[in-house]
Image (tube, rainbow, N blue to C red):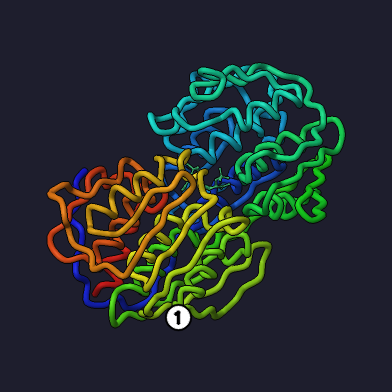
């Protein structure tokens, strides 16, 4: 689908309730499925990715019902799943695939996962290898890719491992397997990654001990159903945060956004760059949330790398866009993980921002961007999401400060994480 983008916006104003967090929504139905009792999750994100997690669990016999804003899940415990009639299609969703691999690595029947063209190119060996050490048998295309089959398995042994990639998806997959192992497992991270699985495990009555970067996950007693509200997604809020900073005469309030400290790196980076962002109405449940008030600001260059990367991993396309408007040269490094997301995001961000005249150089592990550069179409090529939601959404924000007429190819990709984006944007533009 082609979408005409709004260019040369004059201001953004008003308030917005950001849709539910994608990472927390995925996990809420997974925990709901393995708990005992009925969980009710409100402000759930009904985006393509999370709908794939729901349909996967439904295919395995879990009863999940949807209302306008919430889902109810009738838990079946670890042992109540039933065989799916066919391969389970996980669409575009890396989180669904990797977390469900761990969760389903001890089922007495085989389970096959497939995905779209992008997901079928993403590496799964990072989860397969440690799960096999625990006793699972997984046969994957070229030992690394979808389609893959988790063979029938009756026993998992505990794992003591340093996880070789700083990835919350790998950590969470191993935590779900560790919950079903014979002894406590010890999992050490290279750097802190988002900790939603740890928080939700405790919320559902389970146990995890955390010392520095090491998690100890014992076999879990029966988890208990819970009901809660999913906070707004910081990674979705990020598009409007940057839009309000860049578009002149803007001030917006984003309500009840998740402020978990493993997700707020984007706010730290923007604050370093000189952005005006305030936090109000903090609410501390098992996940912290609050309102963000963001105003037009002028930016200066910064450096982003090292252990900060996992905390901003999905916001790096936006940091690159911010850097095109900042005074000086911004360096983004240690971010080679971007090459194995929905697209190679180093390549796609560089190619697309160049179409708007940005001064941006691709590096093996990041990008170097010099600003400020006024944006306008410098090639006759249309902008392209390349089928990657975060690239499409970043380009819609770039368009707001660009001159001329811009169209986005493959705009439907945004439905993966933010189906209401263009409606929400229209509300803030009026
Ligand atoms: O655990 C999660 O929910 C996610 C973790 C990140 O991936 P990695 O852990 O693979 O870096 C992130 O990019 C993805 O959007 C969601
Ligand atoms: C990388 C992402 O998601 P996933 O890995 O779940 O496909 C993302 O949402 O940017």
Rendered image quadrant of residue 137: top right
- In the image, farthest residue toward the right: 183
Residue 335: x %, y % from top left: 51, 49
Residue sitting at x 30%, y 75%: 12
- Ligand 2 near label 1 (Cβ, under 8 Å)? no
Q: Secondary structure at mark 1?
A: strand
Q: Circle 1 is placed at which residue position?
A: 276
As drawn, is 395 to the left or to the right of 390? left
**Residue 59 rendering spot, x and y as whole percentages:** 52, 28
**Nearer-the-camera pick, 72 or 22:** 22
Q: Could you say where residue 134 lies in the image, as x and y percent from the top left?
A: 76, 26
In the figure, is residue 160 to the left or right of 123? Answer: right
**Residue 127 in the image: x percent, y percent?**
63, 32
Q: Nearer the viewer, residue 391 or 13?
A: 391
Q: Quadrant of the N terminus?
A: top left
Q: Which residue appears at 31% of the width and 62% of the height?
A: 397
In the rendered image, the quadrant that contains the C terminus is bottom left
Report the side of 391 relative to 98 (left or right). Answer: left
In this rendering, would 322 be left or right of 84? left
Image point (17%, 57%), residue name: 377
Categorize mark 1 by other alpha carbons within 10 Å: few (<14), some (14-19), many (20+): some
Relative height, residue 99 to residue 362 (above, below): above
């Amino acid at each position: 689908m082609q979408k005409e983008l709004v260019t040369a916006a004059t201001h953004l104003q008003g308030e917005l309730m950001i849709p539910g967090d994608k990472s927390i929504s995925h996990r809420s139905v997974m925990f709901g499925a393995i708990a005992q009792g009925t969980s009710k999750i409100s402000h759930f994100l009904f985006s393509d990715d999370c709908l794939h997690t729901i349909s996967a669990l439904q295919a395995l016999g879990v009863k999940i019902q949807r209302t306008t804003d919430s889902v109810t899940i009738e838990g079946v415990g670890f042992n109540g799943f039933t065989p799916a009639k066919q391969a389970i299609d996980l669409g575009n969703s890396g989180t669904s695939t990797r977390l469900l691999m761990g969760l389903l690595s001890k089922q007495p029947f085989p389970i096959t996962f497939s995905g779209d063209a992008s997901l079928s190119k993403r590496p799964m060996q990072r989860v397969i290898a440690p799960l096999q050490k625990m006793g699972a048998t997984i046969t994957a295309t070229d030992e690394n890719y979808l389609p893959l089959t988790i063979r029938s398995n009756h026993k998992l042994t505990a794992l003591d491992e340093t996880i070789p990639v700083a990835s919350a998806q790998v950590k969470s997959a191993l935590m779900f397997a560790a919950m079903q192992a014979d002894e406590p497992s010890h999992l050490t991270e290279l750097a802190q990654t988002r900790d939603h699985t740890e928080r939700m495990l405790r919320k559902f009555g389970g146990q995890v001990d955390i010392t520095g970067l090491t998690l100890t996950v014992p076999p879990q007693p029966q988890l208990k159903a819970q009901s809660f509200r999913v906070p707004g997604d910081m990674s979705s809020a990020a598009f409007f945060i940057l839009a309000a900073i860049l578009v002149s005469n803007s001030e917006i309030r984003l309500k009840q956004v998740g402020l978990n400290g493993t997700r707020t790196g984007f706010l730290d980076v923007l604050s370093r760059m000189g952005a005006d962002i305030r936090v109000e109405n903090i609410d501390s449940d098992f996940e912290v949330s609050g309102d963000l008030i963001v105003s037009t600001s002028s930016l200066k260059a910064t450096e982003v790398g090292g252990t900060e990367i996992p905390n901003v991993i999905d916001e790096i396309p936006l940091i690159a866009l911010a850097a095109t408007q900042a005074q000086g040269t911004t360096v983004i490094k240690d971010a080679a993980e971007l090459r194995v997301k929905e697209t190679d995001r180093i390549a796609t961000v560089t190619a697309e921002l160049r179409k708007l005249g940005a001064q941006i150089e691709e590096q093996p592990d990041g990008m170097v961007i010099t600003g400020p550069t006024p944006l306008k179409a410098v090639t006759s090529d249309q902008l392209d999401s390349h089928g990657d939601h975060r690239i499409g959404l970043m380009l819609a924000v770039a368009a707001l400060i660009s001159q001329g007429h811009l169209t986005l190819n493959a705009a439907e990709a945004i439905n993966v994480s933010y189906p209401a984006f263009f409606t929400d944007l229209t509300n803030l533009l009026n």
